[in-house]
Structures are given as C-alpha cells and as structure tokens.
Image (cartoon, rainbow, N blue to C red):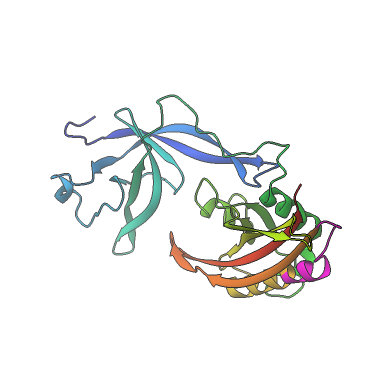
Amino acid sequence: MIDMGLSAEVTRRKLVLGSQDTITGWFAPSYTEEDIDMVILPSGSQYLRMLPGADVRFDAVGRTADPILPGDQIRANGIYYTIKEVKPWYILNSFAYRDAQLAELSTYEAGAEPKAASASSAAVDPRTRTKTFLDLYLSGGNICKNDGATPAPFITAFGYPPYSFQYVFKAPKQKYVVYAIDEPNNSRAIPSGDQITRRYEITIPIHILCIDQPDATGTILKSNALKELRRICEVYQADSPVSFRLLDREIPHDRPLGGFTLYDTEYNLLYRTDTT
C-alpha cells in the first residue's frame, strides 16, 4: 500500500449472479475475490493531479489496467467501495487503463457479505399481487426482437436491481426487457352506497426497461412490451371478483447509463381491490 490513501494492490470482489429470487425477481448476487493493481484517490484529494483526466463524482476514483465492471466491489485499506461507473482510456488505438467511479459502502462491515433485498414468501401486498398477475398472463411470444418472430427474453421484478443493469441486459443474463414494479405511491378508499369503505384504489408504478440489443432496437422492444402490458390489463382487467386493474398515465425516464441508453418508461397501474 502507498501512504496518503493511495492503494497499489487492492481486492476486487467480482459480482456473480445466481438464480432468481422467487419474490423480488432479481438474481441473487455473490462475490469472488482476486487481487488487482489499482490507485485509489478519494474525493478532494490534493493528489488528484497524479491521475491526469480523472474526476471524482462519488467518493473516490480508482485507476487500473485490470478488468473491472460496474457492480463489482473494491476493498482497500479496510474500506469497501462499489464500482458505479467504468471509463476506459486509450492512447491512439491501444488500451491504456480504466477509471472507476467508487462509492464507499459506509454501513458495510469488513468480512460481511451483502445480502440481496428479499421479501417474505408469505407477502400478499399489492406489489406482490401485481408481480403474480404479470407472471401469470404476460406472454413472451408477444414480445419479439426486430424480426417480429423471435421472442425477446424478459423478467418481472421489484423496483431496480441491487447491481448494475449491465449484468441483466448483457452477459451473463442477456435479458431484453424488465418489467420493474415499484412501491405503491398512492392509495384512496372507495366507499360503497352506505358510505362504508369496501374497496381501495392503489397506484402501482410499473417501469418497462430495455436497451438497444444487437438484434433488437430498444424503442421497438419497449413498444412491444407496452402492447403486451396493455393487452393483459384489457383482457384480464377484472381477473377476480374482488380486483380490477386499469393502466393509467405514461412517464418517460430514458437516460444514458454506463455506455448505453436505458429506455425507462413508467406506467401507473390503478389497482382496485377489497379491504383484505
């Protein structure tokens, strides 16, 4: 190790994704460790001039020629970081090194494994019911690649993943579309004729997430995924005697993310159910 907070040899904790969590829909993360060479400079360090061209947008920046990916972790001098972004640098046409934007894991205890967010298998909240609804009725045959015939693999999950989208849309999982279900953000009582509340209307945000793939344009994927979501909300609008679903407004959130554009459109699902 080098003094003044600079690290020459650090531990890379490479993110590995396992099987899907049956409740959240995301892939269980684990980490494999290996030593790599990296110089780490914290935000505000007077030594930043030692890394020409580097800037710090989180807690630190690390420069290395070794392989790293967003979502990996770095352990240096007893501090744990998660890699938020990676930018490669080239001299003419030859690769030189990578700069990594590092966010410190302030609540992370040395030696402890971070756990994936999960929910009780007995959960019956509106978000869980919505995921069950999507898993039951969404048809992969209606979400196709550019050829209009090959099904595009998709998953349904809670909110956003606890790791980089790169691992979901590219290797190792190679998913084309994600239906991400956020926490309900609005609820109102619907009184009956006798003014006794017998039903509730809950607003559940559903995000359709995708990127441009070699054989599928992101905007086409998003359009096909929306058509399929609309289809099941129309065909199975009242899928039980006590529930009713209606797709409401559309809110675009498209943004650049780690070298690719994340197509992210939010749709509000109005979910009406009884008081149970």
Q: Position of residue 127 (x, y in %)?
A: 67, 51
Left or right of 223, for residue 30: left
Number of residue marks: 0
Q: Quadrant of the N terminus?
A: top left
Q: Position of residue 176 (x, y in %)?
A: 64, 61
**Residue 34 location, quadrant:** top left
Nearer to me, 142 or 244: 244
Kindly tell me whether residue 251 is visible in this rendering.
yes
Q: Which residue is drawn at 33% across and 51% down?
A: 98
Vertical arrangement, residue 74 with respect to residue 159, above or below: above
Nearer to me, 57 or 13: 57
In magenta stretch: residue 232: yes
Name the outermost residue toward the right. Answer: 241
Q: Position of residue 210 (x, y in %)?
A: 58, 64
Kindly tell me whether residue 213 is visible in this rendering.
no
Q: Which residue is drawn at 50% across and 68% down?
A: 253
Q: Where is residue 247 in the image (x, y as percent from the top left)?
A: 69, 69
